Image: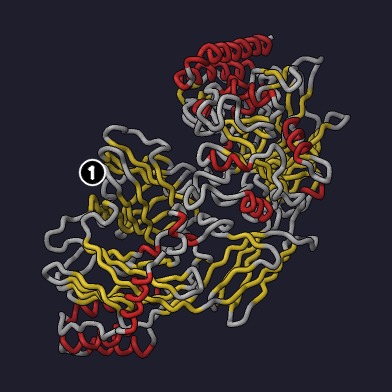
C-alpha cells in the first residue's frame, strides 16, 4: 500500500505548485517544428488544443525574436503540463509538478503534457513510467490496490521517439484512473545518455533504406517502404526473423506498429546454446486493430541471444512497423527520477444492463465497448476476473453494471455465434443509464435438440492469470460459457496451477452450472506425464489423479497407459489440438490421388507423411488401434474422439479420414483450447451433440462418444444427417456468413467428395438431399462445409464386411507409426519402454492386416 508519508509528500507538492521553470531562449525554427508536430499529434489522439491556443502558436511563426517565440510557446503549453522533467548538463535530474490540475475521471482517459527541460542536450528516448501503472494481470496479489493507474505515452508519428537535444520540448502523457477514489501516483522518468551513463540500447532497427536484417521466414512477405516495415501475412503461421547478438538478462523489445486485424502476436528467441525456437522461449502480446501503438514485450534469454522471431498474428493480414528497439529491462543504463502526484478522481456514471435472449428469457451476453477513439472499456490492463485482460469484450447479464466516463460509445453486442451481432450507440451523461439488449438469432440448435459444447477450455495457464491469482474460478468460467451460449464447457485442469485448480474437480457437473449451461472440470494431460507424445483430453472422470501421488509427477509417460487408467473409470477420451506435429511433412507414401469433382473444396486424404514432432494427434496413430478394459473389464476403444476445429483443418481431417478408411470408428469433436490456441472467446470450435431435454452431462458426453454429433465453428450447421431407405442421404443445413453468401455442402465417401449442393448463407434452415452414391464396398459417408462444419460418419456396410476403404491409407498409417516411434521413443520412461514397444508393434500389425484385407 502507498505509505502515509508518500501521501503527505504528494499533497504538499500539489499544494505548492509553482510556475514551471522558464527557458530564456532556444532557436525558434526547431522549436516551432517540434510544436507543430505536437499540435498534430494531439489532434491525432483526439485531445486537440483549444482554438485560441492554436491561434497563439500559429501567430508565433511571424515572430522574428527567438526569445519571444520561446516565451510564447511556454505560455501556451505550460498550463497543460502535469510534470516537468529537468536534466542539467552535469547529469542531475529534477522532477517537479507542473501547472495542470491533477484531475482524472474514473475509468476515463485524460491527456496531459510533460515539459522537458533538456540542458544536457540528450538525444535518447525519454521513458515515462509509474509503479502505479504496472499491469494487474501477472502482478503480485498484494499490489492490486496500488496499480490503479493506466498510462499511455504517445511518441508515435508525427512525433519522434528520441529527444531532439533542444533545451525545450514537450511530450504527451495520457492517464486513466481505474477506480473512483482520490489516489497518489509516482510519475517516473528514465533518461539515457547522461554524462557517465552507458547506453541501454542493444539494437535499433529503422527502415528508411531496407528491412534492416529482418527477413520473411514463413507464410509472409516483408518489404521496407515509406520508412516502415510492411509485413503481409499470406497464411495462418506467419513469422519473420532477424539475427541479433547480446548477452543474457532481462530485455524489452519495443516497436511502434499498426495491425489491420486484432489478435495475438508472439516473439520467440534463440541463443547460442539453443539455436532453434520452441514453446518454452516465447512471449505473447495482444494486438489492437486499426490503430498505431507502442508494443513492449519483456523476455529473459538464458545464455547469449542469437536471434529474434516475430509472429505478427495467426492469420492472413497486414502489419506496419515504424521502428523497433531492443533494450535491457529494469532501467539498466537509465537514470530514473520521479515525483509523487496527488490526483483527484471524479466518479464516472453507472451503466446498468438489461439482457434477454431472442425468446425473452434472461441471458448473459458479450459486450465490446469502445469510445470515439477506439479505446476499449474497461481498460484491459486493469481488469480482474471475471473480466479477462486478454479479451476486448466483457460479459454481463441483467442488473449488472459498468461505470463509464461521460461520452459517446459504440457497443458491439452478441450472444454466441448463432446470434446476429449488433453495434449500438451508448451515450453516457451525468445520470445513470440503462443499456438494453435483446439477442436476435438466426438459428437456435438447442431448440432442435442439438446442444453445443467445447471439450477443451482452461481456467489457468497460457493467457490466464497465474498471478495475482492462480487462474480463475468456476464462477468466472461459467459467465464466459453462458455469454457465448455454449451449453457445455469442459474445463480441463493441466500443468499450470494444477495443484491449485485441482480443488475444483468433483467428478460431476460443477455447482456454479445454471442449466442448460453446464460446467464440468476434468483433465488435459499437458505439461506432465505422457504429454510429449500427444496431449490427451480426459472427460467424465471419477478420479482426476492416478494412484501413486497427489499431483502431476507420477503420471504414465506412455499415452496408452494413461488411457488405460482413464477408461477403467469410464472416461471419454480423445486427442487435443490434433494438428500439432502434423503440419511438417518428412516424406510421402504411395497414394490414391483420384480425381476431385468440380467445385470440391479440397482433395483429401493426402499422403504427405507428417513429422509427428508435436503434441497433437501423434501417438494417436498407435492408440486408436487398441482396446483396453472398461469399468466392467470388457474391452472398449482406448480413444473415443479426435479433436478438430482449433488447428489447420486439412491436417486435422486428413488424419481422421485415414483412420476411418482403416475401419477405425473414431468420431470428431470440436474444441477451442481456450485461452492457449485462442483467447478470443470460448467455443470458437464446437461440437453439437444430439441429446434430450433437459440437458444432462452424462447423456451429452455419451452421445459425443457415439458420434451423435457434428463439429462446427458455429457459422454453419449440418443437422440430422441420415441415410434414407432408398440409399440417398439427407440433412438439414443452415449457415449465416455475410462474407460468403453461397456455400457448398459436400457429400464425402471415404474422404472423397462425390456430390455437392448449394447452401445460401442467409440463416434459413433448408433440407438438402443427395442422390444415392455408388458404393461397391463397405464405406463411410459424411457431409461437410469446408472449413467450418463436418458431420460424423455413417457406416454403409456391404456384405457385412468391415470398412477397408483404402490400402494406401493403411500404408500411410503404418509409415506414421514408424515415424512417430522415431520422434517419441525417447520420451517414454524406461519402466514403460516394453509397454511402448508392444503398443507400437500392435498398431503395425493392425495396419498391415488392414492393408492386406483392403487389397483383396
Residue sitting nearer the eye, 426 or 64:
426
Name the residue tied to disc 1: 246
The structure's colour scheme is secondary structure
Q: Is residue 786 visible?
A: no
Q: Report helix, strand or loop for mark 1.
A: strand
Residue 244, x across and y down, in percent: 25, 43
* Relative side of 811 to 486, left or right: left
Residue 435's x, y, as percent? 67, 72
Q: Position of residue 778 (x, y in %)?
A: 75, 19
**Quadrant of residue 577 within the rendered picture:** top right
How crowded pointer 1 is (Cα within 10 Å; few <14, some 14-19, many 20+) is rated as some
Q: How many marks?
A: 1
35 displayed left or right of 345:
left
Q: Is 27 located above or below residue 572 in the figure? A: below
Instruction: Please give left or right for residue 210 compared with residue 220 in the image.
Output: left
Q: Residue at coordinates 74% horizontally, 52% vertically from top-left?
A: 514
As drawn, the residue found furthest toward the front would be: 4
Toward the viewer: 148 or 665? 148
Tell me the quarter of the picture where residue 564 sits: top right
Is 296 left or right of 205, judged from the image as shown?
right
Q: Which residue in the rendered view is the most extreme toward the right? A: 725
Q: Nearer the viewer, residue 728 or 368?
A: 368
Quadrant of image for the C terminus: top right
Establish if 834 lies above or below 394.
above
The residue lying toward the viewer, choosing from 57 and 537, is 537
Q: Is residue 241 above or below residue 412?
A: above
Can residue 325 be seen from the camera position used here? yes
Identified at 59% across, 20% down, the residue is 561
Residue 731: image location, x then y, percent: 79, 40
Q: Quadrant of the N terminus?
A: bottom left
Amino acid at each position: 500500500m502507498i505509505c502515509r508519508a508518500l501521501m503527505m509528500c504528494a499533497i504538499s507538492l500539489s499544494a505548492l505548485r509553482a510556475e514551471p521553470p522558464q527557458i530564456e531562449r532556444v532557436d525558434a525554427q526547431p522549436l516551432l517544428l517540434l510544436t507543430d508536430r505536437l499540435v498534430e499529434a494531439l489532434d491525432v489522439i483526439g485531445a486537440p488544443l483549444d482554438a485560441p491556443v492554436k491561434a497563439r502558436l500559429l501567430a508565433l511563426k511571424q515572430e522574428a525574436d527567438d526569445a519571444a517565440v520561446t516565451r510564447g510557446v511556454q505560455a501556451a503549453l505550460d498550463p497543460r503540463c502535469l510534470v516537468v522533467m529537468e536534466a542539467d548538463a552535469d547529469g542531475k535530474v529534477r522532477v517537479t509538478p507542473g501547472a495542470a490540475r491533477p484531475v482524472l475521471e474514473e475509468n476515463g482517459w485524460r491527456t496531459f503534457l510533460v515539459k522537458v527541460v533538456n540542458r544536457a542536450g540528450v538525444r535518447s528516448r525519454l521513458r515515462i513510467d509509474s509503479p502505479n501503472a504496472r499491469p494487474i494481470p501477472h502482478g503480485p496479489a498484494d499490489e492490486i490496490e496500488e496499480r490503479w493507474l493506466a498510462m499511455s505515452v504517445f511518441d508515435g508519428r508525427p512525433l519522434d521517439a528520441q529527444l531532439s537535444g533542444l533545451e525545450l520540448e514537450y511530450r504527451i502523457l495520457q492517464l486513466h484512473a481505474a477506480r473512483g477514489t482520490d489516489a497518489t501516483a509516482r510519475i517516473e522518468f528514465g533518461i539515457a545518455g547522461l554524462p557517465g551513463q552507458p547506453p541501454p540500447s542493444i539494437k535499433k532497427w529503422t527502415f528508411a533504406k531496407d528491412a534492416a536484417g529482418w527477413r520473411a521466414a514463413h507464410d509472409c512477405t516483408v518489404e521496407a517502404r515509406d520508412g516502415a516495415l510492411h509485413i503481409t501475412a499470406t497464411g495462418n503461421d506467419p513469422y519473420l526473423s532477424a539475427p541479433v547478438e547480446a548477452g543474457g538478462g532481462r530485455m524489452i523489445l519495443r516497436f511502434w506498429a499498426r495491425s489491420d486485424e486484432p489478435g495475438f502476436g508472439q516473439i520467440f528467441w534463440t541463443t547460442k546454446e539453443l539455436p532453434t525456437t520452441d514453446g518454452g522461449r516465447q512471449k505473447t502480446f495482444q494486438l489492437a486493430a486499426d490503430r498505431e501503438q507502442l508494443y513492449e514485450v519483456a523476455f529473459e534469454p538464458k545464455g547469449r541471444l542469437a536471434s529474434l522471431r516475430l509472429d505478427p498474428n495467426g492469420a492472413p493480414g497486414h502489419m506496419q512497423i515504424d521502428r523497433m528497439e531492443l533494450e535491457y529491462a529494469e532501467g539498466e543504463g537509465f537514470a530514473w527520477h520521479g515525483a509523487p502526484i496527488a490526483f483527484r478522481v471524479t466518479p464516472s456514471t453507472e451503466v446498468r444492463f438489461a439482457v434477454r435472449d431472442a425468446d425473452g428469457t434472461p441471458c448473459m451476453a458479450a459486450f465490446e465497448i469502445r469510445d470515439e477513439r477506439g479505446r476499449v472499456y474497461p481498460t484491459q490492463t486493469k481488469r480482474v476476473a471475471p473480466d479477462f485482460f486478454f479479451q476486448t469484450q466483457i460479459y454481463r447479464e441483467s442488473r449488472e453494471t459498468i461505470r463509464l466516463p461521460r461520452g459517446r460509445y459504440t457497443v458491439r453486442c452478441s450472444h454466441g455465434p448463432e446470434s446476429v451481432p449488433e453495434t449500438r450507440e451508448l451515450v453516457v451523461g451525468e445520470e445513470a443509464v440503462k443499456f438494453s439488449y435483446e439477442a436476435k438469432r438466426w438459428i437456435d440448435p438447442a431448440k432442435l435438440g442439438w446442444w453445443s459444447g467445447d471439450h477443451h477450455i482452461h481456467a489457468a495457464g497460457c493467457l490466464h492469470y497465474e498471478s495475482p491469482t492462480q487462474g480463475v474460478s468456476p464462477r468466472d468460467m461459467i459467465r464466459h460459457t453462458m455469454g457465448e451460449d455454449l451449453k457445455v464447457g469442459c474445463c480441463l485442469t493441466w500443468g499450470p496451477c494444477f495443484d491449485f485448480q485441482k480443488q475444483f474437480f468433483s467428478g460431476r457437473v460443477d455447482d456454479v452450472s445454471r442449466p442448460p449451461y453446464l460446467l464440468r472440470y476434468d483433465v488435459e494431460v499437458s505439461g506432465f506425464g505422457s504429454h510429449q507424445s500427444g496431449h490427451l483430453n480426459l472427460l467424465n472422470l471419477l478420479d482426476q489423479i492416478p494412484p501413486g501421488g497427489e499431483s502431476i509427477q507420477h503420471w504414465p509417460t506412455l499415452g496408452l497407459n494413461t488411457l488405460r487408467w482413464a477408461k477403467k473409470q469410464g472416461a471419454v477420451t480423445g486427442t487435443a489440438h490434433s494438428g500439432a506435429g502434423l503440419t511438417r511433412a518428412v516424406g510421402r507414401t504411395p497414394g490414391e490421388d483420384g480425381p476431385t469433382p468440380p467445385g470440391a473444396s479440397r482433395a483429401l486424404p493426402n499422403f504427405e507423411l507428417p513429422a509427428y514432432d508435436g503434441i497433437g494427434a501423434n501417438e494417436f496413430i498407435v492408440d486408436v488401434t487398441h482396446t483396453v478394459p472398461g469399468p466392467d473389464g470388457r474391452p472398449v476403444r482406448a480413444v473415443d474422439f479426435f479433436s478438430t476445429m482449433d488447428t489447420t483443418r486439412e491436417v486435422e481431417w486428413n488424419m481422421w479420414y485415414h483412420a476411418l478408411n482403416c475401419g477405425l470408428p473414431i468420431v470428431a469433436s470440436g474444441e477451442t483450447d481456450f485461452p492457449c490456441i485462442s483467447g478470443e472467446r470460448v467455443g470458437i470450435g464446437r461440437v453439437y451433440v444430439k441429446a434430450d431435454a433437459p440437458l444432462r452431462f452424462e447423456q451429452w458426453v455419451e452421445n459425443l462418444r457415439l458420434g451423435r454429433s457434428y463439429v462446427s465453428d458455429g457459422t454453419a450447421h449440418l443437422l440430422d444427417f441420415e441415410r434414407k431407405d432408398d440409399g440417398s442421404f439427407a440433412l438439414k443445413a443452415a449457415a449465416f456468413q455475410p462474407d460468403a453468401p453461397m456455400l457448398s455442402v459436400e457429400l464425402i465417401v471415404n474422404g472423397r467428395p462425390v456430390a455437392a449442393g448449394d447452401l445460401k448463407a442467409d440463416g434459413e434452415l433448408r433440407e438438402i438431399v443427395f442422390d444415392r452414391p455408388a458404393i461397391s464396398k463397405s464405406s463411410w459417408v459424411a457431409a461437410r462445409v469446408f472449413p467450418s462444419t463436418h458431420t460424423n460418419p455413417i457406416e454403409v456396410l456391404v456384405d457385412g464386411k468391415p470398412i477397408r476403404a483404402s490400402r494406401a491409407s493403411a500404408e500411410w498409417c503404418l509409415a506414421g507409426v514408424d515415424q512417430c516411434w522415431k520422434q517419441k521413443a525417447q520420451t517414454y520412461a524406461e519402466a514403460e519402454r516394453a509397454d511402448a514397444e508392444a503398443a507400437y508393434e500392435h498398431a503395425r500389425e493392425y495396419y498391415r492386416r488392414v492393408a492386406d484385407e483392403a487389397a483383396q
